[in-house]
Image: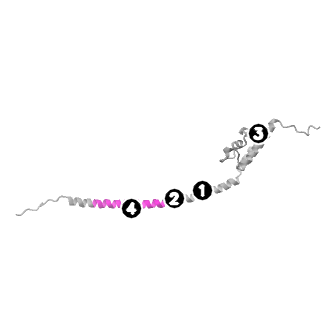
Amino acid sequence: MNRTDRTPPPDPYEKRRAATDRKLRAALERLIEQRPSHPALQNGYRLEVATLAREAGVGRNAIYTNHRSIIDALKLAAARPHPKAAESLEEKVVELRAVIREMQANERRLLTQNAALLQRALSAEADAQRYRRQNARLVATRNEAARPTPIGAGAQNTR
């Protein structure tokens, strides 16, 4: 037997490292496809080392020390626009444009209401001014009528 043809069996460290690598690659694929299995990631996540570690069930330190290629793959995946993300952005743009149109219509309605209220306020102020002048005239007329007039003042009784 030739010893050079045989490879030595992997030691426990290599087995553990290979198993971790498989877990990380599977977790990275799930994250890229936006179907994470970890419950904390169901509501959204960013492609980061901490997210990958949580999804794979390994420590971040293990990724940083032994799996630099996974970090590089993660950075590449994070830099790529995801088609589903682009679709969701398109949907978000359409939704936000509808909100903008609705708000513009609401603004026009409020401007019209504001102009009508301003017109009513100006009209009410003009009416109030007119009523104040009329009241002043009426008070002056009443005061003139209520003023006592002397009887026979200046006129002599000739009998």
The residue labelled by disc 1 is 96
Does the stretch in magenta take in 123? Answer: yes
Residue at 67% across / 56% down in the picture? 87
User: At which x and y percent is residue 100?
Assistant: 57, 58
Query: What type is the residue that disc 4 sits on?
Result: Ser
The quarter of the picture where residue 22 lies is top right
Residue at 37% across / 59% down in the picture? 125
Q: Is residue 142 above or below residue 47?
A: below
Q: Nearer the viewer, mark 1 or mark 3?
A: 1
Counting residues from the start of the chain, the first of labels 1 and 3 encountered is: 3
The residue labelled by disc 2 is 107
The residue labelled by disc 4 is 123
Number of other residues with Cα within 10 Å of mark 2, as a class: few under 14, some 14 to 19, many 20 or more: few
Tell me the distance, in whole angstroms, between the alpha carbons under discs 4 and 3: 81 Å
Counting residues from the start of the chain, the first of labels 3 and 2 encountered is: 3
Counting residues from the start of the chain, the first of labels 1 and 2 encountered is: 1
Q: Magenta segment, which residues? A: 111-137
Does the stretch in magenta take in 18? Answer: no
Query: What type is the residue that disc 2 sits on?
Result: Glu
Residue at 26% across / 59% down in the picture? 139
In the picture provided, is 18 more to the left or to the right than 158?
right
Q: Secondary structure at mark 3?
A: helix
Instruction: Indicate the colouring scheme.
Output: one colour
> Outermost residue, right direction?
1
Tell me the distance, in whole angstroms, between the alpha carbons under discs 1 and 4: 40 Å
C-beta proximity under 8 Å, tags 4 and 3: no
Tell me the distance, in whole angstroms, between the alpha carbons under discs 1 and 2: 16 Å
Residue at 46% across / 60% down in the picture? 113
Q: Is residue 33 above or below residue 58?
A: below
The residue labelled by disc 3 is 66
Tell me the distance, in whole angstroms, between the alpha carbons under discs 3 and 2: 58 Å
Q: Secondary structure at mark 2?
A: helix
